[in-house]
Structures are given as C-alpha cells and as structure tokens.
C-alpha cells in the first residue's frame, strides 16, 4: 500500500494547527512560502522538497497551546524551545529524521554570517529559508487578509529591515524575486487550506509505506497524549497492545499494522475538541482532516466507532481489538504486578471472549509491551525536558 507523503504531512500539519484559530494555516502557508523561496533561490529539487516537508512540520515541537503561540510574535527574542523539541521528535521517526536538523535550527538568525554555524555544526540552508518564510507568514497572519495588498509594502519593509541581521541576504533576494511575480501576494490572501495544497506539486512517486505512516502516527500519538488526561504512554501502549492482540489472533500483517496505527490515533479527536461541530460526513474535525488519505479510511472508521461507543460496529473484529487495547492499557496504568493483572483480567467481562483467551495466555508479554512503552515515552520526555529547562 502506498500513501502520498506530502499529502500525509500536509494533513498532519493541519491537525497540529487545529488547537488554536491563530495557528490556522500557519504550517501549510509557511511551507508554501518556503518552497517558493527555495525555488527562487535556485535550491536543488531535493533541497526544495526537504524545505517543503520540514516547513509542513516546523513548529511540531510546540507541545502545548502556549508553546505553539509563542513563535507567532515577529520579534522572537524568546528562547525557542519548540525548535529544539521539534528536531528531537522528528529524529525519533526514521523517515523524518533527515528533516530533524532543519527544524531544530529554524529560528537561527543569520547574524551577519555568524548564524551559518552553531557550535561547530553547519546550520542547514533549508533552516534559513524556513525562518524567513515563517517570519513572512507571521507578518501576514498579523494583518487582515483583506488588507494584505495594502500592507505588502509595510511587510516588505520589515523583512528588508531584517536583512543580514535576521535573514541571509541571498534569501532576501529570493523574497524579492518571488514577491515581484504578479499574483504572489494575492495567493496568500486565501483562507482555504486546499488553495495552498493544490499549488504544492505532488512529487511523482513520492509515496510512503504503511510502516512509515505507522511511525508518523506514533509521533502524533505523543501530541495527542499531551492533550489528554491519560499520560504520555497511553496511545503508544494502546497501539502496541492492540497490534500484539491482532497478531496473536493470526490476522494478516497489513491489517495488524492498521490496527496498531488505529491504537496510536484512537484518541485523535482530543486535538480538535475546541472546534465546534462535526466535520464531513459526521466525522470529528480531526478525522475529517485526515480523510484525503484514503488508504486509512478504515482506520478512521474503527476509531470513530470506538469514540462513539457504537454497539453496532462492535461486530467488527478490528473495533473489538482496539477496544480491548484501550481497556487493557487503562487497566495497566493502575496495576504493577502480573498477578494482579492476571486476576483483574479473569474478572472482567469487558473484553470479547476470543480476546480474553489471548490476554489470559499472553498476559506477561502484554504487560512487558506496556512497560516498554512507558520507558520509551519517559526517555523522550527526559530528552525534551533537557532541551526546555523550566
Ligand atoms: Fe517556529
Ligand atoms: Fe512557525
């Protein structure tokens, strides 16, 4: 199964922006501007692609609402923890690790050339371009879109003012080159996400596997759990335990992978709680956002069924497995010994009989998966805490 990479990251960037209306379109518009600047600066096609992909996720390290709004001030004199944290999160996903340093350094000022290096390490060119694109978008977002055409001189002057101190001079030239093309400013007036996406080229054959999507979902699970009450390991453990149960039942490998991914994302609606109303076809807004990724529609339907506690859909084996994964993970949050786990599982009627049998026979392995998930998340949190000392 092949899933379009850019579409996936674009959808995820939209979900990350959902938590506050002020962030609306920030990722996709920054990525769009950065990609245009990279082209105008004669970046290679590979560099343009990396700029675009990193632009779509550049503020992913803003793990709470405050941290996400902080970099929206043009004068970003604050220490930007979110860039270092974003770099750390991307480094944990093999497919996204080549974007890690770009995101890590995306608030590096040019500082008359001193910003070309940090601690003996070269700052990626893509970071400098994204920083400029990000600042342009912050200025655009601060202006009423209807008045953008009137404000463009003021915005241009502010950007020009930052030349050499904030931004690399070559990229200021790229800014002039792109923004002097007829219609460039008008395109940025749009408040429709799809207007930006349709401009971004779908790079031929730029597909990812379901394994890759599963790994990206595990990263998103960390964001989701940051907005829920269940602890940082909750979605990761639910996904891994659900995947284990599916494999123990002898289900086909692709389906097992989808069930594991469903466990990672089962609480996705948490991220769009602030948005009123339902999305398309009764989906929660967060799930509606992922709907362009047609390959995961079945995962979305299982998780929605789980959300709505829809008794009819429990007839689906995948939903019963995910339900068991959620239940077992919740139970294990309060249990420390295998004897206690075994005893509690024997008492419960919450799990479908075919799964209860597996849990009884595999309780040691399941508890191990839970404990490994806790350890993995704790290590990530410790690394993040070292990057953002309080
Ligand atoms: Fe940022
Ligand atoms: Fe940003």
Image (cartoon, helix red, strand yellow):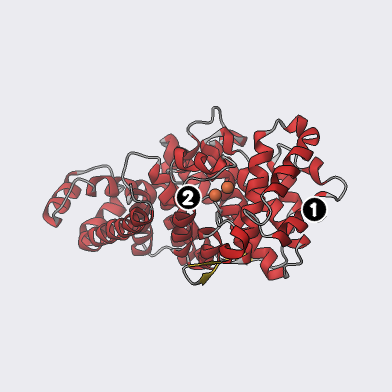
13 relative position to 168: left or right: left
Task: Give the mark, 2 or 1, whose residue is nearer the N terminus.
Answer: 2
Is 254 placed above or below 225 here?
A: below
Residue 290 at x, y percent in the picture: 58, 47
**CB at disc 2 and ligand 1 closer than 8 Å:** yes
- Number of the label disc, if any, that sits on residue 312: none
Asked which quadrant contains residue 306, the reply is: top left
Q: Which residue is mark 1?
A: 176
Task: Name the image quarter holding residue 267.
Answer: top left
Asked which quadrant contains residue 381, the reply is bottom left
Q: Secondary structure at mark 1?
A: helix
Q: Is residue 318 visible?
A: no
From this view, report whether residue 275 is shown above or below residue 328. Answer: above
Placement of the N terminus among the 4 image quadrants: bottom right
Q: Residues within 10 Å of mark 2 (few under 14, many from 20)?
A: many
- Expressed as whole percent of the image width and height from the top left, the position of residue 284 reads 53, 36
- Which residue is farthest left? 339
Dot 1 crowding, Cα within 10 Å, few <14, some 14–19, many 20+: some
Q: Position of residue 388 (x, y in %)?
A: 38, 51
How far is mark 2 from mark 1, CA to CA?
Answer: 27 Å
Residue lying furthest top:
276
* Residue that appears at 30% across and 53% down: 355
Q: Is mark 1 within 8 Å of ligand 2?
A: no
Q: Which residue is mark 2?
A: 80
Q: Position of 345 compared to 376: left or right?
A: left
Q: Residue at x 71, y 39 (%)?
A: 192
In depth, the one of 32 and 220 nearer the eye is 32
Q: Nearer the viewer, residue 166 or 260?
A: 166
State the residue at coordinates (49%, 58%).
216
């Amino acid at each position: 199964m092949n899933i379009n990479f850019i579409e996936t990251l674009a959808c995820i960037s939209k979900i990350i922006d959902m938590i506050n209306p002020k962030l609306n379109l920030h990722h996709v518009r920054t990525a769009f501007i950065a990609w245009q600047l990279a082209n105008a600066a004669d970046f290679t096609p590979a560099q343009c692609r990396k700029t675009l992909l990193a632009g779509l996720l550049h503020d992913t390290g803003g793990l709470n609402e405050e941290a996400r709004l902080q970099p929206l001030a043009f004068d970003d004199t604050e220490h930007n923890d979110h860039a270092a944290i974003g770099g750390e999160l991307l480094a944990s996903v093999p497919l996204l690790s080549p974007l890690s340093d770009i995101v890590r350094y995306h608030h590096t000022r040019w500082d008359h050339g001193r910003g070309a290096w940090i601690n003996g390490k070269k700052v990626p060119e893509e970071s400098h371009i994204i920083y400029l694109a990000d600042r342009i978008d912050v200025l655009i977002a601060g202006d009423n879109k209807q008045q953008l055409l009137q404000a463009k001189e003021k915005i241009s002057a502010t950007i020009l003012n930052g030349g050499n101190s904030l931004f690399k001079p070559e990229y200021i030239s790229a800014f002039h080159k792109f923004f002097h093309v007829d219609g460039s400013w008008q395109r940025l007036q749009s408040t429709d996400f799809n207007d930006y996406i349709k401009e971004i080229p779908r790079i031929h054959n730029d597909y990812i596997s379901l394994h890759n999507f599963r790994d990206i979902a595990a990263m998103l699970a960390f964001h989701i759990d940051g907005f829920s009450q269940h602890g940082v390991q909750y979605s990761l453990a639910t996904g891994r335990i659900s995947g284990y149960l599916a494999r123990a039942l002898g289900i086909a490998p692709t389906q097992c992978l989808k069930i594991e991914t469903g466990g990672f994302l089962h609480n996705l609606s948490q991220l769009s709680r602030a948005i009123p109303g339902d999305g398309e076809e009764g989906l929660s807004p967060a799930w509606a956002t992922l709907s362009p990724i047609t390959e995961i529609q079945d995962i979305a339907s299982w998780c929605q069924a789980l959300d709505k506690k829809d008794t009819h859909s429990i007839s689906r084996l995948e939903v019963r497995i995910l339900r068991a994964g959620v239940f077992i993970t919740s139970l294990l949050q309060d249990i420390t010994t295998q004897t206690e786990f075994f005893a509690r599982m024997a008492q419960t009627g919450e799990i479908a009989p075919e799964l209860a049998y597996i849990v009884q026979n595999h309780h040691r392995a399941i508890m191990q998966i839970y404990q490994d998930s806790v350890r993995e998340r704790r290590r990530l949190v410790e690394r993040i805490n070292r990057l953002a000392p309080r």
